[in-house]
Image: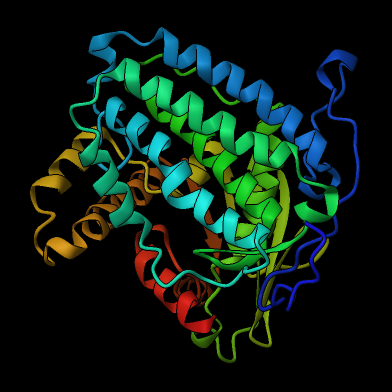
Amino acid sequence: MGLRLRFAPRPANVRIGPTHYHDPLLRARGERPVSDFTSLSRRDWLTLADRFYGRLDRTLAGLTSDEWQRPTAYLGWSARDVLAHMTSAMPVNFREVLGRALDGNPGPPPEFDTFSRNAREVERRRTVPVASLVREFRTELEAILRTYRELSDSDWDRPAWFFVGRVRVRTLFLAQFADNVFHERDLLMANRRWPGFDPEYTAPLVDWFLRELRPATFRPERAVGLRAAMRYRLHGPTGGDWTLTVADGACRVERGADRRVDVTLVADAESLVAAAQARAAPWVGRLARTVDWIRGRARAEDTVAAVTGAASLAWALARRRIRIGGDRTVIARLNRAFWHFWQRTAMTAANIAKG
């Protein structure tokens, strides 16, 4: 664990703040949830994750056999398929890159096509009983959380790699945490039992999503000569203001609304993340599955993601769940200057090539 690493994460287009410390036990004191993700320590994040995973465990135990078969908003999969994906993502995706980082090899693996990997693992578990999937999920979750609990704070900040490029070990933990938070939403919305996000852990995850994950998807080669600022104004218990700035081939996102901007996006955090992560009405995903062969079987998952992604954003805009105003030329250029969810395979390949 104390090895000297050969290189640090490339700053590239991402500005990641240092790790600070903050007591997360806010609910007992009646305080507003912490929304600055950098102010939470490894121990703080593990405390929040334990609370969420306790809730998730109750969710998994409470679904009936019929409810496990219901279609979800995620890629045309049933609730059972989503559970199979949540289970397999830990050993197949997260454990690989975490292990490489902790072994002092934070560069990219030769292949990391998560869409194809996930689809293969879901299919492989097609006949596994739900009870067995739940047991496997609990086993895999406890194993990977044990690894994070045993890390030192310096290990938490070690360089790592994910499909967005070079990151830190903390990012791998937060990506899995956020992924499972939204997958619980998939399971419960499919069964009309969704109570809404708990802001205690969702607020800092939204901050992470905007300040670290969003700029990590920036494509500087598509932003030549672009200088623009965009405000994200999110309402609700996990809301706030963030300002994204693109200039000189770099992107950063900062908290606050202290400067003039060219574009303003107004939404609640849930609608924004749902659109960004291609959550669409279940029938859209099921329809997409019937035409997933159009670009070839090898790109079936990319096709489904593209269809659900386009439908999700169109629905959010049409229903005014997301409102975007400002200079239309700048809006179009900013949209082109970032990788999108359904472009993950191409983004991953590009980031592997960068090393």
Q: Quadrant of the N terminus?
A: bottom right
Q: Horizontal and vertical percent for residue 216? A: 60, 67
User: 281 or 350: which is nearer to us?
Assistant: 350
Residue at left 39%, top 40%?
88
Give the colouring mode of the picture. rainbow
* Residue 188 visible somewhere in the drawing: no
Residue at left 36%, top 11%?
63
Q: Horizontal and vertical percent for residue 123? A: 21, 40
Q: Is residue 262 left or right of residue 256?
A: left
Q: Horizontal and vertical percent for residue 18? A: 85, 58
Q: Is residue 350 left or right of residue 305?
A: right
Residue at left 23%, top 52%?
304
Q: Is residue 321 left or right of residue 173?
A: left
* Residue 340 visible somewhere in the drawing: yes
Q: Is residue 80 left or right of residue 207?
A: left
Q: Quadrant of residue 46?
A: top right
Query: Seen from this angle, which residue lies furthest bottom?
Result: 225
User: 164 or 250: which is nearer to us?
Assistant: 164
Q: Horizontal and vertical percent for residue 114? A: 37, 56
Q: Quadrant of the C terminus?
A: bottom right
How many labels were placed on the picture? 0
Residue at left 68%, top 55%?
169
User: 277 or 168: which is nearer to us?
Assistant: 168
User: 315 or 307: which is nearer to us?
Assistant: 307
Q: Quadrant of residue 97?
A: bottom right
